[in-house]
Image: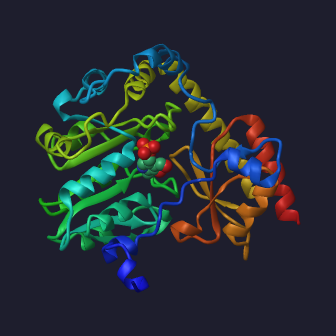
Amino acid sequence: MSEEDQAPPIPDHIRDLAAYQPGRLIEDVIEEMGLATAVKLASNENSLGPSPLAVERIGRALWGLARYGDADSRRLREAISRKVGHPAAGVMAGNGSSEFILVMAHALLGPGLTAVMSRPSFTLYAKNAQAAGARAIEVPLGPGHGHDLEGILRQAGPEARLVFIDNPLNPTGAFLGQGEIERLLRGLPRTAILVLDEAYADFARAPRPDYGRLLADGRVVILRTFSKVMGLAGLRAAYALAAPPLAQALNKVRQPFNLNNLAQVGAMAALEDEGHVRRTLEMTWSALDRLGRELPALGLEVFPTQANFVMAGLPDGLLADDFAKKMLTEGVIVRSLSSFGLPGHVRINAGLEPELEALLGAMAKVLAA
Ligand SMILES: Cc1ncc(COP(=O)(O)O)c(C=O)c1O
């Protein structure tokens, strides 16, 4: 048999997909570099750790693992419904917000249709649209490194079914207010759904959009995750809000039991744990203020942010991939933005004081070399 005969029958649009590039695992970096310890400020995680209440309740739930759990995450969805004031029939529970992105692409896209998003923005939007056989239209950022609303509206034609807006925007931290989002929604064709990904909105110090008014339009899906402010990235839990008919349609496409028993219990506890959220916000804002003062002193350009991270431009001529590699040898993981199309920029998330000390010390050393 020739090599061609043996090739598995993979459609071109799947073969051509680039794989998702996750941040490096701390344990891998420690092993690879022969270090005693490492600091990770590369995946916008919560350095305070998970909600302690979530950890305690998950511990107690472990003995229930022999049973299938609630395939519909009903108790969790009802708790979210009470917390945000949106009917439970319009609340979806997901295995991370990345599951919603996949489910929406699977349910709403296909050949001949398009999804519109900014470039750069969260890379899973384009990838899932392409995997569904649709065209991903990536619109360059506008002034201030934010979403270019006019550009997005120009590209969202009659074939557009999904428009993805991460607000705040990953990786720049730019933020849209109520007026801008309403203007975008008014300008989109009625056939397009606006996905407002609020993974980082809890960290915004600017006023947050009134999601109740946006949801009333019927064409909006709001994504929120337990991975960031609640510190549960490894648990995989998120929720989405939409008008009930849209939520019910999307619900038919997801896997049953998409949230495992522990994720349902942990997410419910985290919703209650307002103290952990408050402490996380205090830690995050104080770290961002420090990075905003100290990174420019090292020669980096820092962009305004409403998220739990900053984007920083490296001094002239430095490549982010090289810089991030050198930082690894110092035991500090930062995110090069070259895979986002920004070869001279890095993204650094907020962390605890000792982590910031390690970061700034390593940066001073690498930049001086
Ligand atoms: C904008 C944005 N949305 C969603 C996610 C994924 O979140 P989750 O852990 O809920 O899948 C991320 C993760 O980094 C993100 O940056």
**Residue positioned 17% across, 43% down in the render:** 252
Q: Is residue 297 visible?
A: no
Residue 367 in the image, given as x and y percentages of width and height: 82, 63
**Residue positioned 60% across, 30% down in the render:** 49
Q: How many numbered markers are drawn?
A: 0
357 left or right of 341 in image: right
Q: How is the image coloured?
A: rainbow
Residue 248 in the image, given as x and y percentages of width and height: 14, 39
Does residue 2 sit above or below 257 in this rendering? below
Does residue 202 sit above or below 316 in this rendering? above
**Residue positioned 42% across, 18% down in the render:** 272
Q: Residue furthest top?
A: 60
- Between 215 and 144, the residue placed more toward the observer is 215
Q: Quadrant of the N terminus?
A: bottom left
298 left or right of 14 in image: right
Q: Quadrant of residue 160?
A: bottom left
Q: Quadrant of residue 243?
A: top left
Residue 82 in the image, given as x and y percentages of width and height: 27, 21
Residue 162 in the image, given as x and y percentages of width and height: 24, 59
